[in-house]
Image: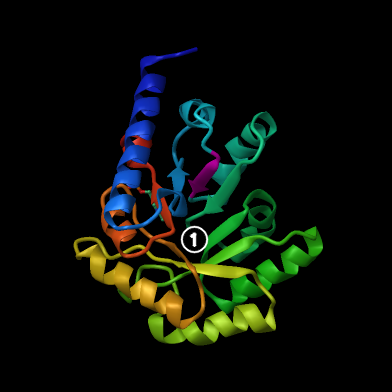
Amino acid sequence: MVTNRNLEITGQFTTLTERISKVAIQAERRPEDIELIAVTKTFTAEAILPVLKLGHRVFGENRVQEAAGKWPELRNRFAGIKLHLIGPLQTNKTASAVSLFDCVETLDRKKLAKAIAAEQGKQNKQIELFIQVNTGAEPQKAGVLIDDLPGFVIFCRQELGLHVSGLMCIPPVGENPQKHFSQLKNLAKENSLNKLSMGMSSDFAAAINCGATHVRIGTAIFGNR
Ligand SMILES: *Cc1c(COP(=O)(O)O)cnc(C)c1O
């Protein structure tokens, strides 16, 4: 059934992908080098369908439980879905997370790294991992502190053999995000990681200018939550 809401989401998605391409080209980057993660937290399968029908396959969810409620069924209907976990992961939900997600972007502590490694062994599945960096050193925010990053990367890759491919950050509210994006880019380079998940609806242009390879966007596609 085509409803007004569906048409709105289809239009917003198309406009967004055009904006991403434009920003990429202005930054002298190739649009196809920027992966759009459509963030579907709080939205139902019904709202997600128009985006799937346009052929988009990469999505982000914040909570394991919520993802478990909608994505298995959508995966049965649409092939090739890639799901990223972009919210904090509690160790006791590691088994579900490894089974549901293709990528966890919020790896941020040794205990979780060990739990993921163990679970991957049990499920005989390897997922992609991004390390979340707390670039603003905010006490209430998850993420590895900048000074702890090099040691943590080595621990995850060399001691546990995890497939860590990038870094993710959420800049502090009310600060110019550009500084944090540039910092994340430098940190990735210093630690031989080549993927950068940064930029949301309000700041994805700045993130693309700073080298984002993944942007996580919800509101600009689906509307306010
Ligand atoms: C919700 C969320 C997003 C998407 O934010 P929008 O402003 O809706 O685009 C991106 N990243 C994380 C970690 C989120 O929790």
In the image, 184 versus 121, the foreground residue is 184
Q: Which residue is mark 1?
A: 88
Element at label 1: loop
Q: Please give the range of residues in magenta.
A: 57-61
Farthest top residue in view:
1
Quarter of the figure that contains the C terminus: top left
Q: Left or right? Give the position of 165 relative to 29.
A: right
Q: Position of residue 130 (x, y in %)?
A: 52, 66
Q: Left or right? Give the position of 76 relative to 167.
A: right
Q: Residue at coordinates 48% horizontally, 51% vertically from top-left? A: 62
Image quarter of residue 152: bottom right
Q: Position of residue 196 (x, y in %)?
A: 44, 64
Q: Is residue 222 above or below residue 193?
A: above
- Whether residue 135 is visible here, answered yes or no, is no
Q: Position of residue 115 (x, y in %)?
A: 67, 70
Q: Left or right? Give the position of 99 relative to 186.
A: right
In the image, 24 versus 10, the foreground residue is 24
- Say how the picture is coloured: rainbow
Q: Position of residue 67 (x, y in %)?
A: 57, 43
Q: Residue at coordinates 44% horizontally, 44% vertically from top-left? A: 39
Image quarter of residue 98: bottom right
Q: Residue at coordinates 78% horizontally, 58% vertically from top-left? A: 123
Label 1: few (<14), some (14–19) or many (≥20) C-alpha neighbours in 10 Å: some
- Whether residue 112 is visible here, answered yes or no, is yes
